[in-house]
Amino acid sequence: MFQTRRSEENDSSNVLVKLGFARVATKQRCIQFHEIIKSYARKKADVEVAYAMLHAINAKGSIPEHNEHIWATCFLLFKFGTKLALLKPKASELVYFIKQMALPLATYTFTKFSRCSTALELLRLCSNALENVEGPFLAHIDEAFNKSSCWGSSYTPTKEFNACIYHECATLKATLLEIRAKLMLQGGDHAIGQQLCGQSISIREVLYGSDHPETISVCNTMSELFRAQEYS
């Protein structure tokens, strides 16, 4: 079945090349569409196409093989520069994409190409996106708490509040902050790294407690930042 699907993809690619819509790319098993075709596609495509791309990347994306497509998805999801984000996926979809695709992509970009600033910017945008996800959750908790305080009833989670998604979002945010702090350590930006580490520690102390290995790990990073600052 896999070979049949691969054969169908190759046949479709060959037809596009023969018709002049695309040309063979240097990357194996890839073709490149001409600019006029890409411009037409941008004008005609609707947001459903962009969502389909996100779903495909979440389902079958691979950093070494599809890093360009994952970058394209990041531009659809996050606000780079003056360009507004096109997609507003469900919280679960966004958290999954950041955890499984965007975070590994940032690591790959730094380790493979030594692009520290690019990796940091992607991680920063991921952190901002998670904060936007957290906002409605926190507002819902505050509203429910206020109601229970006024009416003397206990707080009962509703369908609008998904505790698992909120916990995963907070956990992922702490991880992003720690990784950003480690990159700041390598780049010599110790003060910013300490701020990021402090935020990560605060989150993990609430989630796990001060003696948990995850909390201790980021505390060790904070110690490294202080030592590096002393010797700089």
Image: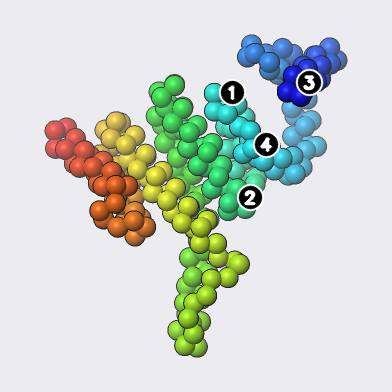
Q: Give neighbour class at mark 2: few <14, some 14-19, many 20+ (Cα, 10 Å).
A: few
Q: What amino acid type is highlighted by mark number 1?
A: Glu
SS assignment at label 4: helix
Which of 216 and 80 lies nearest the eye of the viewer? 216
Closer mark to the observer between disc 1 and disc 2: 1
- What's the mark number on residue 56? 4
| Residue under numbered circle 2 | 89
In the image, 2: left or right of 120?
right
Q: Residue 29 falls in which quadrant of the image?
A: top right
The location of residue 124, given as percent across then percent down, is: 44, 43
3D distance between C-alphas at marks 4 and 1: 14 Å
188 lies above or below 207: above
Q: What amino acid type is highlighted by mark number 4?
A: Ala
| Residue under numbered circle 3 | 4
202 lies above or below 155: above
- What's the mark number on residue 65? 1
Closer mark to the observer between disc 3 and disc 2: 3
Closer mark to the observer between disc 2 and disc 4: 4
